[in-house]
Amino acid sequence: MQDLTVAFLQFDQVWQDKQANYSRIASYFQARQSIDLVLLPEMFHTGFSMQVALADDWLESEGLAFLKALAHQNDFSIYTSLMVQDDGLYFNRGVLIAPNGNVQIYDKRKAFGLGGEDLYFSPGVKESIVLLKGWKINLQICYDLRFPELVRNRITDDAEAYDLLLYVANWPQKRIAHWDALLQARAIENQCYVVACNRVGIDANQLVYNGRSQAIDFYGSYLSGPHEQEGLFVVSLSKYALAEGRKSLPFLKDA
C-alpha cells in the first residue's frame, strides 16, 4: 500500500446549472497535477436539490460522462455524488471513477428527512468499500455522517475492514459544529483517515455553506483544514503512519 495523495475541491456550486458547474470544476484542473484521488461536493453538478426532473438517467448520464473524461484526462480517480434515475427509482448516488472509466457506486443510505430527501430518493441498502492503490476506502455521503453504526470498522481476517473514510456533502453553516465534531469522532473511533468535502456559498433555499472541508488522521488531528474559502486542497496520507498508529494503539481488536 503506497502513500495516497488526495485533493478536495471546495467550491460554490451553481444552483441546478450543470454546465456552469462543469466549467467551474474543469477550471481547477488546467494543468496536470500529481493526485491520486479528487473529491467533489455532494450532488456535484446541481447542488442539493430535490428537483428530480434534473436527475441523470443512470445509463446515459451526462454527469458521469463529464467525470469520466476529467478522470481520464488528469489520470486520477474521482469521488462525488449525483442524483440519478435508475430503473424507475431516484438515488443520491456516490460514484468513484477510475482513470480507465471504471465506476464503483454507493447509494446514500440515510436520506435527510429534514430537507425532504426521503420523499424523493430511495435509500441505499449496503456498504461500499472499494480498493484504490492498495487502500481500502469506505464511501459515504453527507447525512450518513450522523450514523456511526454505518461505518463501524472491524478486524476481519487479521486486517482492518478499511483505511480511509470519504464524505462528500452539502452541510450548512448553521450545523457546522456538528460536522467538525462528527468527522473527528469517526476518525478516532475507527482508527482511519477521514477526508470530507463540503461546499461554500448560498443555495436557492438561502442556506449558507462555509465549507470546512478537511482531512483528519487516525488520532483525530487535522492534516488539512478545516478550510472555509473556495479552493482545491491537497493532502498526502501516509500508509506507514497509519500502520504504526494502529500497531501502537490496537483498539480495533477489542471491538
Image (cartoon, rainbow, N blue to C red):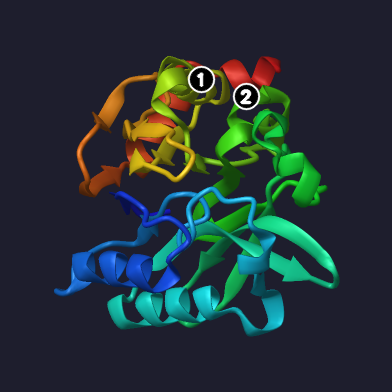
Identify whether 3 is placed above or below 109.
Answer: below
Q: Label 1 crowding class (10 Å Cα cut-off): few <14, some 14-19, many 20+?
A: some
Q: Is residue 123 visible?
A: no
Residue 34 in the image: state x and y as whole percent: 21, 65
User: Which residue appears at 51% of the width and 20% of the height?
Assistant: 182
Identify whether 169 is placed above or below 56.
Answer: above
Quarter occupied by residue 90 = bottom right
Residue annotated with mark 1 = 182
Quarter occupied by residue 93 = bottom right
Residue 21 in the image: state x and y as whole percent: 36, 65
* Tag 1 and tag 2, C-beta contact below 8 Å: yes
Residue 168 in the image: state x and y as whole percent: 48, 45
255 and 60: which is toward the camera? 60
Identify whether 224 is placed above or below 134.
Answer: above
Horizontal side of 98 relative to 104 (left or right) equals left
Identify the amino acid type marked 1: Leu
Horizontal side of 241 relative to 167 (left or right) equals left
Residue annotated with mark 2 = 146
102 and 90: which is toward the camera? 90
The earlier-in-sequence mark between 1 and 2 is: 2
Q: Quadrant of the C terminus?
A: top right
Identify the amino acid type marked 2: Arg
10 and 219: which is toward the camera? 10
